[in-house]
Image: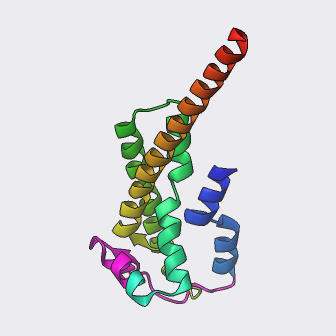
């Protein structure tokens, strides 16, 4: 379910909708490279969003900050990769999402209904930070699990000694 939601919120590409838009002559602009939806300057969008401080911008920043946290947490939980590799996976996963959004923006730049998604280095930064949040959550989970396991072990020993 998580991957379907992730796909739908980040890179969903509706070929049927695009073909209908083409058939109904909505391709009204000449092709141009959509520089207006690309940001290569680190922290530029984050700072602008925090200065504006409106509900949509806060949701945007928090959404990107926690976007890959579930993925990274389960990678760590099922011991599919080390801590370092999990952060690297999050980085490349986020970079892939942004590149797909760039391709989508290039394709849709000719249509009247807009450019769709934006490609932003700040999204890569925030999504990679979500891997560190997952690391912290996983360490907390492991600590609680260890303490509970020891508590139950001590409780069993006390009951068996009586």
Q: Is residue 45 above or below residue 156?
A: below
Residue 21, visible in the rendered structure: yes
Q: Nearer the viewer, residue 157 or 124?
A: 157
Quadrant where the C terminus is found in the figure: top right
Instruction: Give the image location of residue 80, x and y in percent.
Output: 49, 31
In the picture, residue 95 is in which quadrant?
bottom left
In the rendered structure, the answer to whether residue 26 lies left or right of residue 119 reads right
Instruction: Give the image location of residue 60, x and y in percent.
Output: 51, 74
Residue drawn at x 45%, y 72% is: 106
Residue drawn at x 65%, y 66% is: 14
Q: Is residue 35 above or below residue 62?
A: below
Q: Is residue 52 above or below residue 109?
A: below
Task: Please report the bounds of the magenta region as a residue range.
Answer: 24-48
Residue 115, visible in the rendered structure: no
Extreme residue in the left direction: 41
Residue drawn at x 51%, y 60% is: 66
Instruction: Give the image location of residue 62, x and y in percent.
Output: 50, 69
State the predominant SS element of the stretch in magenta: loop
Residue drawn at x 50%, y 29% is: 79
């Amino acid at each position: 379910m998580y991957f379907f939601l992730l796909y739908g919120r980040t890179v969903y590409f509706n070929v049927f909708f695009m073909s209908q838009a083409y058939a109904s002559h909505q391709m009204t602009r000449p092709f141009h490279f959509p520089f207006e939806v690309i940001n290569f300057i680190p922290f530029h969008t984050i700072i602008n969003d925090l200065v504006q401080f409106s509900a949509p911008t806060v949701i945007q920043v928090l959404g990107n900050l926690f976007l890959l946290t579930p993925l990274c947490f389960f990678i760590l939980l099922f011991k599919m990769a080390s801590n370092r590799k999990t952060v690297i996976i999050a980085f490349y996963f986020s970079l892939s999402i942004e590149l797909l959004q760039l391709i989508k923006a290039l394709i849709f730049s000719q249509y009247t209904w807009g450019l769709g998604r934006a490609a932003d280095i700040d999204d890569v930064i925030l999504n990679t930070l979500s891997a560190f949040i997952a690391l912290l959550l996983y360490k907390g989970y492991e600590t609680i699990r260890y303490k509970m396991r020891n508590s139950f072990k001590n409780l069993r020993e006390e009951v068996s000694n009586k």
